[in-house]
Image (spheres, rainbow, N blue to C red):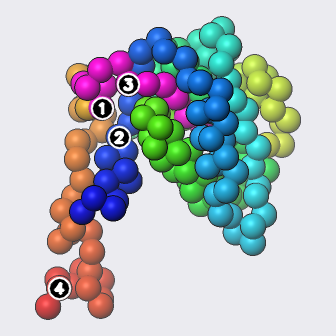
């Protein structure tokens, strides 16, 4: 069905071309983030939009699979009020990625870990110590059509595709096939 094509076609993009993201496009992606729903509308988040090449390169060294930040023309770093908002953070990340994809801008999550890398990312961005700083989202136009596929060598780390609906969904009760 065409109605959900944008959502279904969202893939992680880890290679970008050098085209910068226009400011109005970046602004619209940030608007999509701003309108994310959160528990009790608490909006327990702040964002750091990063375009500086040196900062992006330094952030790319803050996670084992954060390399794609180095090539990305921009990134958005998520900072939650504290560690209790993982559900809200996931929704925020998804809004950013779908907002970007609506403009043809590819994206990928970069997780910062372990603790010393989170501290390094906080320091680089001036994020206060009590706030979370473990997730960034690379943004950029895909380098080529292959950039929408999982990169060679990555398949050993993450599986390709998704489980079938028959495995994912139980009807009326857990694990029950549709009657
Ligand atoms: C919580 C979370 C953390 C992730 N961390 C990383 C990461 O550090 N580096 C990376 O390249 N991809 C990361 N990803 C992207 C996943 O690997 C990717 O979404 C998954 O393999 C499915 O592929 P697809 O997004 O292309 O459909 C992360 C995704 C999630 C939801």
To which residue does mark 1 refer? 148
Q: Are marks 1 and 2 in contact (CB under 8 Å)?
A: yes
Q: Residue at the spot x=75%, y=72% of the render?
A: 40
- Is the CB of mark 1 within 8 Å of ligand 1? yes
Q: Are marks 4 and 1 in contact (CB under 8 Å)?
A: no
Q: Which quadrant of the structure image shows residue 117? A: top right
Q: Residues within 10 Å of mark 1 (few under 14, many from 20)?
A: some
Q: Is residue 114 above or below residue 178?
A: above
- The span from disc 1 to disc 2 (Cα, nearest Å) is 6 Å
Give the secondary structure at mark 1.
helix
- Residue 11 in percent (x, y) is at 35, 40
**Which label's residue is closer to the chain start, 2 or 3?**
2
User: Which residues, given as a range, are shown in magenta?
Assistant: 132-148
Q: Is residue 98 above or below residue 129?
A: below
- The span from disc 1 to disc 3 (Cα, nearest Å) is 7 Å
- Residue 125 in percent (x, y) is at 77, 24
Q: Residue at the spot x=46%, y=32% of the render?
A: 105
Q: Residue at the spot x=59%, y=60% of the render?
A: 87
Q: Is residue 158 above or below residue 145?
A: below
Image quadrant where one finds the N terminus:
bottom left
- Is the CB of mark 2 within 8 Å of ligand 1? yes
Q: Residue furthest left?
A: 179
Give the secondary structure at mark 4.
loop
To which residue does mark 3 refer? 142
- Residue 107 in percent (x, y) is at 46, 33
Query: Is label 2 or label 4 in front?
Result: 2
Mark sitting on residue 80: none
To which residue does mark 4 refer? 178
**Which label's residue is closer to the chain start, 2 or 4?**
2
**Which label's residue is closer to the chain start, 4 or 3?**
3
């Amino acid at each position: 069905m065409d109605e959900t094509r944008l959502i279904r076609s969202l893939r992680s993009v880890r290679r970008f071309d050098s085209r910068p993201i226009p400011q109005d496009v970046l602004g619209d992606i940030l608007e999509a983030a701003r309108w994310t729903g959160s528990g009790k509308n608490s909006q327990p988040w702040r964002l750091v939009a990063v375009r500086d090449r040196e900062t992006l390169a330094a952030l790319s060294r803050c996670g084992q699979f954060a390399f794609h930040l180095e090539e990305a023309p921009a990134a958005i770093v998520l900072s939650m009020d504290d560690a209790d908002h993982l559900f809200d953070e996931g929704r925020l990340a998804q809004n950013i990625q779908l907002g970007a994809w609506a403009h043809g801008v590819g994206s990928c999550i970069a997780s910062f870990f372990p603790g010393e890398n989170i501290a390094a990312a906080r320091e680089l961005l001036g994020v206060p110590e009590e706030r979370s700083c473990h997730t960034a989202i690379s943004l950029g136009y895909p380098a080529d059509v292959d950039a929408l596929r999982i990169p060679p060598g990555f398949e050993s780390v993450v599986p390709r595709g998704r489980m079938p609906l028959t495995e994912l969904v139980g009807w009326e009760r857990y694990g029950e096939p549709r009657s």
